[in-house]
Image: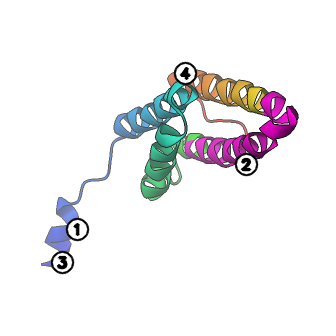
Amino acid sequence: MKNEWQKQIKTPSESNLQRLATIVYALQAVSLFTGTLTLFAGIIINYVRKEDVQGSWIESHFQWQIKTFWYSLIWMVTGGVLTIFLVGWAILLAASLWLTYRIVKGWVYLNEQRPMPS
C-alpha cells in the first residue's frame, strides 16, 4: 500500500521548477515598488520548495534568491534605521540598486537555463 501511495506522488518537472524560480524573481522585482511584502512571499516559496530543486541547476537560483533576500533585508533595515542621520537614504538607494542587479542577473541566467555561479 505504501509503495502505491509513493508512486502517486509526482516530482515537479524542471520546467515547473524553473517557472517557480521565475515567479520568485518577479516577486522580488515587484518588491522594489510595493515594499517588502512580496519579498517575503518569495522567500517563503524558496524555503518551502527548496527540497524539490535539490541537485538540479535550479538549486543555485534558489540559493541566489535566498542570499538576495537576507542581504537585502539587512541593508534595508539598516538603511531605514539610519535615515534619521541621512546616510540611511544612501544605504537604501545602494540596497535597491544591488537588489535590482541580483534580480536581473538571476533572471538572465535562469532564462538561459544556466546555474548561478557560486
Question: What residue did someone put label 1 on?
Answer: 6
**What distance separates the C-alpha of mark 4 from that of mark 1?**
33 Å
Q: Badge 4: few (under 14), some or many (20 or more) residues near its Cα, within 10 Å?
A: few
Closest to the observer, 21 or 113: 21
Residue drawn where x is 23% and y is 60% of the image: 9
| Residue 16 placement: quadrant | top left
Q: Which mark is residue 2?
A: 3
Helix, strand or loop under label 3: helix
Residue 5 in the magenta stretch? The answer is: no
Residue 78: percent from left, percent from top: 77, 46
Nearest to N terminus: mark 2 or mark 1 = 1
Amino acid type, mark 2: Ile
Magenta residues, dominant SS class: helix
Query: Where is the C terminus found, in terms of image quarters?
Result: top right
Helix, strand or loop under label 2: helix
Q: Is residue 104 toward the left or the right of residue 31 in the image?
A: right
Residue contact between numbered discs 1 and 3, judged by CB atoms under 8 Å? yes
Q: What stretch is highlighted in magenta?
A: 62-91
Name, please, the residue furthest toward the bottom: 1
Nearest to N terminus: mark 4 or mark 3 = 3
Question: What residue did someone put label 4 on?
Answer: 112
